[in-house]
């Protein structure tokens, strides 16, 4: 609802539309619930240490790439972490990585909650992929997921800002692509999809997809091995005590 409310809004033409800030206010509560679950045995100190290290690395790498031409260095490690430690870990890693990088790069703003929740979904989705796959097939699946997740992330982030961009005119396209409050859902959805395709999909999103997929193919096997060594010492089991492996 944080993202899709503009398409479902009933409003009169010319009526001033304010974003539902209640959704943004709920995000800190979600983080409190996640941290409470972590403190009740979902993650032990070793997993929290891994979470902190990966969040810090992601924050630094995001600052290096800074989204230039769609080059994003944060998503491949987010996907690999979610793959090894599970959906819950991936969700938290997405939130903490984007929050930490925003603090480092002075990127705190109204867009941050949307970035955090969308990145959390990317990490969570990686943890929900089929588990009984290994070797080259696993890398292929992760690379394919990286491409899909990169495009979806760009689409959702565009949806978070598009309703507030006024007078959108794209060269080569007749008419405005701006959001019209109260217009039929299909009409606004069509404007948004055209806007996304012309302004983001072929550039930023494609760059993000290529960067993430290539990083997974090149670095994925080594990083997966390293993370799984750490996972043998501390296994995340949501809702139950953490099992400490041999060694």
Image (spheres, helix red, strand yellow):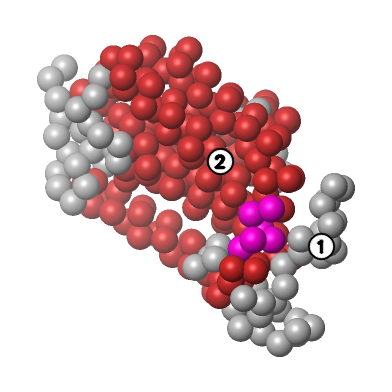
In the picture, the quarter occupied by the C terminus is top left
Between 219 and 176, the residue placed more toward the observer is 176
* Residue 151, numbered label: 2
| Image height of 13 relative to 201, above or below | below
- Residue 126 falls in image quadrant: top left
Between 230 and 189, the residue placed more toward the observer is 189
Badge 2 marks a residue whose secondary structure is helix
Q: Gap in Å between the C-alphas at discs 2 and 1?
A: 23 Å
Q: Residue at the spot x=38%, y=12% of the render?
A: 222
Residue 246: in magenta span: no
> x%, y% of residue 168?
82, 59
Q: Residue at the spot x=47%, y=32% of the render?
A: 146
Give the mark nearest the N terminus, 2 or 1.
2
The residue singled out by tag 1 in the image is: 176
Q: Residue at the spot x=19%, y=27% of the render?
A: 132
> x%, y% of residue 65?
67, 27
Q: Residue at the spot x=72%, y=67% of the render?
A: 179
- Crowding around mark 2 (Cα neighbors within 10 Å: few <14, some 14 to 19, many 20+) is many
**Range of magenta residues:** 189-194
Between 196 and 111, the residue placed more toward the observer is 196
CB under 8 Å between callouts 2 and 1?
no
- Residue 225 falls in image quadrant: top left
- Crowding around mark 1 (Cα neighbors within 10 Å: few <14, some 14 to 19, many 20+) is some
User: Can residue 168 be seen?
Assistant: yes
């Amino acid at each position: 609802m944080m993202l899709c409310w503009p398409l479902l809004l009933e409003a009169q033409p010319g009526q001033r539309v304010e974003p539902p800030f209640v959704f943004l206010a709920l995000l800190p509560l979600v983080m409190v619930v996640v941290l409470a679950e972590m403190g009740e045995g979902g993650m032990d100190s070793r997993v929290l240490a891994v979470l902190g290290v990966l969040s810090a690395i992601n924050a630094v790498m995001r600052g290096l790439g800074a989204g230039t031409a769609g080059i994003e260095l944060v998503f491949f490690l987010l996907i690999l972490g979610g793959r090894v430690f599970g959906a819950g870990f991936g969700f938290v890693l997405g939130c903490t990585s984007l929050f930490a990088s925003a603090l480092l790069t002075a990127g705190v703003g109204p867009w941050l909650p949307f970035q955090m929740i969308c990145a959390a979904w990317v990490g969570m989705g990686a943890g929900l992929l089929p588990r009984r796959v290994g070797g080259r097939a696993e890398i292929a699946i992760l690379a394919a997921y990286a491409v899909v997740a990169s495009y979806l992330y760009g689409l959702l982030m565009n949806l978070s800002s598009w309703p507030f961009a006024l007078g959108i005119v794209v060269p080569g396209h007749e008419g405005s692509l701006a959001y019209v409050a109260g217009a039929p859902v299909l009409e606004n959805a069509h404007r948004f999809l055209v806007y996304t395709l012309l302004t983001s999909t072929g550039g930023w999103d494609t760059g993000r997809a290529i960067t993430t997929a290539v990083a997974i193919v090149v670095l994925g096997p080594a990083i997966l091995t390293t993370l799984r060594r750490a996972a043998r010492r501390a296994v995340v089991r949501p809702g139950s005590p953490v099992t400490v492996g041999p060694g």
